[in-house]
Image: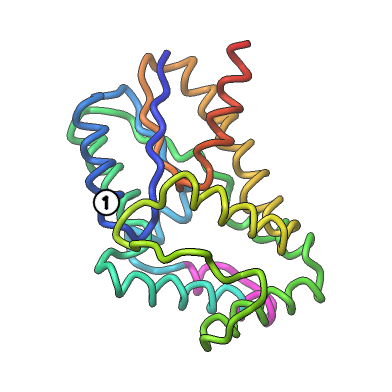
Amino acid sequence: MTIYIVGTSHIAGESVSKVKKAIAEKKPGCVAVELDMGRYAALKSRDNGNGKIEMPLLQKAIFLVLRHVQKQLSKETNILPGEEMLAACECASEVGAKVAFIDQDINVTLGRLMKKLGVFGQLKLLLYMGVGILGIPVKGLVMSKEIDLNKVPDDEFIEYAMGEFRKHFPSVYEVLVVERNHVMGRNLRKLGDEFEDVVAVMGAGHVKSVGKLLESDKN
């Protein structure tokens, strides 16, 4: 079996072209995407899920701020968030590959996140995001270099950004990154047993850890 992982940025035009090229060249039996069924349906309808996920007021505020940030960034690239995931599903159909949703259910992820954070953690996260939108510099959260939003960040930048994320919001990192990496790794292992070739499409911040999880299975 061969599992080929394509790392993306959800608002970068380069991501869409990388995904299309990989699937066209590999012609895999399966294309695995960093989505669950609910998020896929939301992307297809361009409904970000606000009307489908019941949340307390504070949680909804965090969700809306995150959505606002993503939309503002996508305006600079003219790429809608998650467009590379939809492209992966479309390309899979073109080459006759099965599409597999390998991410954890969004409702499970949100529930675990809010439980981990608690009220104080939720307020802290909302504050950091809010001052970021207003352009107020926050110590420790200023990136050391400019990045081209149209391209997938390089490995050095990803390592730095993930390290900062882990340092300032360890609980958020644990749920949004570590736990989901294990879910995606586990699902990819199952697909690897079923298909000879799999192309997996996921955010670049997940690639290194998921790759290590898959490599550990071979030893």
Location of residue 44 in the rendering, given as x and y in whole percent from the top left corner: 32, 58
Q: Is residue 194 left or right of residue 126?
A: left
Looking at the rendered structure, the secondary structure element under dot 1 is: helix
Q: Which residue is mark 1?
A: 14
**Residue 187 against residue 178 in the figure, above or below:** above
Query: What residue appears at the point 41 percent right and 32 percent down from the top-left corner?
Result: 5
Query: What residue appears at the point 73 percent right and 77 percent down from the top-left corner?
Result: 124
Query: What residue appears at the point 69 percent right and 55 percent down from the top-left corner?
Result: 166
Q: Is residue 205 left or right of residue 121?
A: left
Q: Coloured how?
A: rainbow
Give the camera-side residue of 56 and 58.
58
Dominant secondary-structure state across the stretch colored magenta: loop
Give the camera-side residue of 34 and 105.
34
Q: Which residues are magenta?
A: 49-61
Residue 192 drawn in magenta? no
Q: Residues within 10 Å of mark 1 (few under 14, many from 20)?
A: some
Query: What residue appears at the point 79 percent right and 60 percent down from the top-left corner?
Result: 116
Amino acid type, callout 1: Glu
Quadrant in the rendering for residue 3: top left
The mark tally for this picture is: 1
**Residue 50 against residue 95 in the figure, above or below:** below
Location of residue 27 in the rendering, given as x and y in whole percent from the top left corner: 23, 24
